[in-house]
Amino acid sequence: MKTFVAILIALVIFLGLSIWNTIYLTRTSDELANQAEKVRAALSDEEWGDTDTEIKNLRQTWGKHKKTWLLLVEHSDIDSIDRTIFRVDELIRHKDKEQSLADLAELRFLVQDLADKEVLSLANIF
């Protein structure tokens, strides 16, 4: 009976942490994607001052969540997001609108795809 209770407790803890992981990654990936969309909107209007402010906000938002993401997902995925954010930042400094927009689309994809890959579901288990 003690073994059954221990297994049940371990299962409840595992499922609880999995649900928290899913909620956290989904919420923060949506937040990052929304911030990237603000950068895209400012960039599309060629509002370079607003674009600089929004990319700074994106970097701050990413910095706030990156440490927790490092505990939850593969580091290579984090590195891809890091590289893309810094590439977009540099392209914006050089006022390269087209490449910045392409890299922002890649960033939004990476963030959303990463959250989708980490969700606890049967498709991700098998």
Image (cartoon, rainbow, N blue to C red):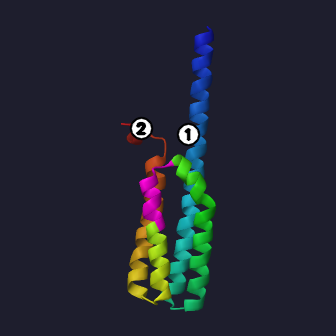
Q: Nearer the viewer, residue 8 or 66?
A: 66
Q: Residue furthest top?
A: 1
Residue positioned 45% across, 61% down in the render: 79
Give the residue at mark 2.
122
Which quadrant of the view contains residue 10?
A: top right
Which x, y percent locates residue 52? Answer: 57, 84
Q: Is residue 78 left or right of residue 59?
A: left
Q: Is residue 13 left or right of residue 41?
A: right
Assign the magenta stretch its main secondary structure.
helix
Against 41, residue 84 (above or below) is above
Q: Is residue 76 magenta?
A: yes
Which x, y percent locates residue 121? Answer: 45, 40
Q: Is residue 122 left or right of residue 9?
A: left
Which quadrant of the view contains residue 32?
A: bottom right
Q: What's under tag 1, amino acid-wise?
A: Ser
Against 4, residue 23 (above or below) is below
Residue positioned 58% across, 72% down in the render: 58
User: The residue tagged with tag 1: helix, strand or loop?
Assistant: helix
What span is in magenta?
73-82
CA distance for labels 1 and 2: 13 Å
Q: Nearer the viewer, residue 27 or 56?
A: 56
Q: What's under tag 2, amino acid-wise?
A: Leu
The image quadrant where one finds the N terminus is: top right
Against 46, residue 38 (above or below) is above
Q: Is residue 80 left or right of residue 17?
A: left
Give the residue at mark 1.
18
Which x, y percent locates residue 5? Answer: 62, 15
For label 1, count other residues whose C-alpha is less than 10 Å away and answer few (under 14), some (14-19) or many (20+): some
